[in-house]
Amino acid sequence: MAHFDQFIQYRALKFKFSALGSMTFDDLERLIEGGNVGTNVDGQFVPATSLEDVSPIPLRNVCAKLSVPLVERLDNALAVLDISKRQFIELALVEALDKVDKVLEEVDAFEYCQPEEETE
């Protein structure tokens, strides 16, 4: 691909993803760490201590032990792309789960599962 084509594609993608919203969880977490986000309690500003304190949706931690070479590869790729682990993992999980859903539907994976009977 020619440099001009690459540059136009880069700018188009930059525009596309800038429309996702100006505030990300990473941005919010940085504000929390700086003591800039919190609530007003009896006229006093009380800084939030965690992302869960201010998130509009419930959050849960996902943790997995990975091999050192894989983590180093991830860290290197994220440094080049200048994105956080949170952004990368969230995007990768959504795409992977969409693929799982598609395969489960294609093979009719639940064909022989009996629905639970309602008890009265």
Image: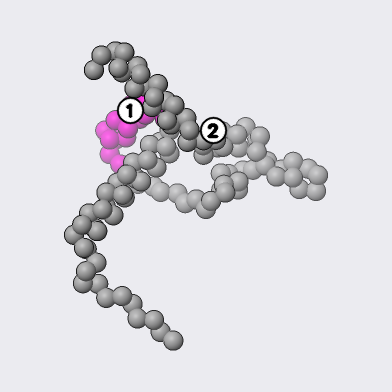
**Residue 71, image x, y percentages:** 32, 35
Callout 2 amino acid: Ser
Give the color scheme: rainbow, by chain, secondary structure or one colour. one colour
State the extent of the magenta-drawn residues as a range. Answer: 66-83
Give the number of the disc on residue 22: 2
Q: Quadrant of the C terminus?
A: bottom left
Q: Is residue 85 left or right of residue 107?
A: right
Q: Position of residue 97 (x, y in %)?
A: 31, 50
Q: Looking at the magenta stretch, what is its main secondary structure? A: helix
User: Considering depth in this image, is 63 or 104 the residue closer to the camera?
Assistant: 104
For this rendering, which residue is in front, 88 or 118? 118
Q: Is residue 112 visible?
A: yes
Question: Is 13 positioned to the left or the right of 27 in the image?
Answer: left
- Residue located at (28% from left, 54% from top): 101
| Residue at x 39% of width, y 47% of height | 63
Is residue 33 among the parts visible in the rendering? Answer: no
* Relative vertical location of residue 63 with respect to residue 7 in this rendering, above or below: below
Q: Secondary structure at mark 2?
A: loop
Q: Residue at 55% across / 35% down in the picture? A: 23
Kindly identify which residue carries mark 1: 77
Identified at 40% across, 21% down, the residue is: 11
Q: Nearer the viewer, residue 29 or 70?
A: 29
